[in-house]
Structure formats: structure tokens, C-alpha cells
Amino acid sequence: MDLVSKSTNPKFKIETTNTMTLTTTSTPIITTGTTTSSRYENQKRRDWNTFCQYLRNHRPPLSLALCSGSHVLEFLHYLDQFGKTKVHNQGCPYFGHPNPPAPCPCPLRQAWGSLDALIGRLRAAFEENGGVPESNPFGTRALRIYLRDVRDYQARARGVSYEKKRKRPKPKITTNASAQD
């Protein structure tokens, strides 16, 4: 299935695209066009709108121009309450077990992969909506460190390793005519 090309099936064709422009009040301006949106673009738009709503509901309300990496970290902590991934605490008897035999009171959190994908979409949406790449709050060092720590902790809690595997070199097949004599 090709997810990049436009659908030729009229039943699944989406005829509107929302484009947002960055304003000083951090309220997106939505204009409607007549192009087809991909699933990724739709998710990116929903994530962007959710983040902008979070900024508007923040106490005190924040403009996107004043948003920093620490506000993005607050947003990720806020999203944890809606997570569906069981992450065992270090004191839990099932810490480090990939398939625990019984339920436990450990919290549900956002999975690392979901957070990583979300930050990628928000980083792209920030720049598409007029943000300067050098001031992108979704690309800060603190955020990269946080995501790495979440990945490592969740891997330990489930007993799964995310360490990079080294590729083995392919064995060389040599045909040596002189060795056969």
C-alpha cells in the first residue's frame, strides 16, 4: 500500500486542507484549500492544534513566540495522563519483566515511540507555520535528553533493550583456484 501517493478512490478522498499561519497571539489562522491531505498531514495538524490549545489554556496563557523547551516538556508530562502503556516503577515486583503475570498499580503513560513521533510532527509543524528553525522549541537539547531518558527507562521497566545492534560483516566467499589443485 502506497501511503505517499494521492488516493484515486473518491470514497477516501479528502477535499480540504487546513493551513495555519503563526500570529503573535499564537492562535492559528485556518484557511481551506482544495487539495488532498495525507494521514501524516492530518495527524500533524491535529497535534499542532492540540499544542496551541494547551498554550492557550496554560496559566498564564502563552504565546508561541514565548514557548520554550521547558513548556514542551510540561506538555509531554500533561499528555502522560492519557497514556495507554503500563510503565512499571522501580519498586514494582514486575519491573524488568516483559510479560508480567498479574496486574499491578503502576501508572499508564505515553509510550516513548508515540512521544518521539509527536515531537517530530510538532517540530515540522512549527517550521511550516512560520517558526524559525533556530528557535524551534521542539528541537532543544533538553527535549532530546528527556526522550532518550524516557526510552531507556521504559526499556528497563519492560525488560527490553534498545541498544543498537552491530551489523555483522557478510562472510566473503573467495574462489581460490590454486587451493583446489
Image (cartoon, rainbow, N blue to C red):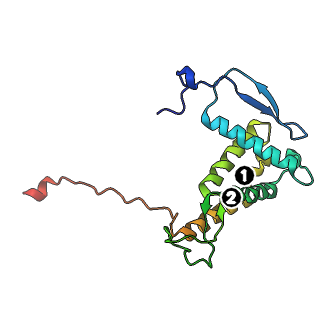
Left or right placement of residue 123 versus residue 3 in this view? right
Coordinates of residue 96 in the picture (x, y in percent): 53, 73
Residue beneath the point at 54% across and 28% down:
5
Quadrant of the rendered image containing residue 42: top right
Question: Residue 5 — which label?
Answer: none
Q: Which SS class for mark 2?
A: helix
Coordinates of residue 19 in the picture (x, y in percent): 75, 30
Quadrant of the rendered image containing residue 73: bottom right
Disc with the residue nearer the chain's start (1 vs 2): 1
Single out the residue that lies furthest toward the left. Answer: 181
Mark 2 neighbour class, 10 Å CA radius: few under 14, some 14 to 19, many 20 or more: some
- Disc 1 to disc 2: CB gap under 8 Å: yes
Amino acid tagged 2: Arg
Residue beneath the point at 56% across and 66% down:
155
Q: Which residue is mark 1?
A: 139
Q: Which residue is mark 2?
A: 144
Q: Nearer the viewer, residue 147 or 96?
A: 96
Coordinates of residue 44 in the picture (x, y in percent): 68, 40
Coordinates of residue 10 in the picture (x, y in percent): 56, 20
Amino acid tagged 1: Gly
Q: Nearer the viewer, residue 164 or 25?
A: 25
In the image, is residue 116 above or below residue 24?
below
Disc 1/disc 2 C-alpha distance (Å): 7 Å
Locate the C terminus by quadrant. Answer: bottom left
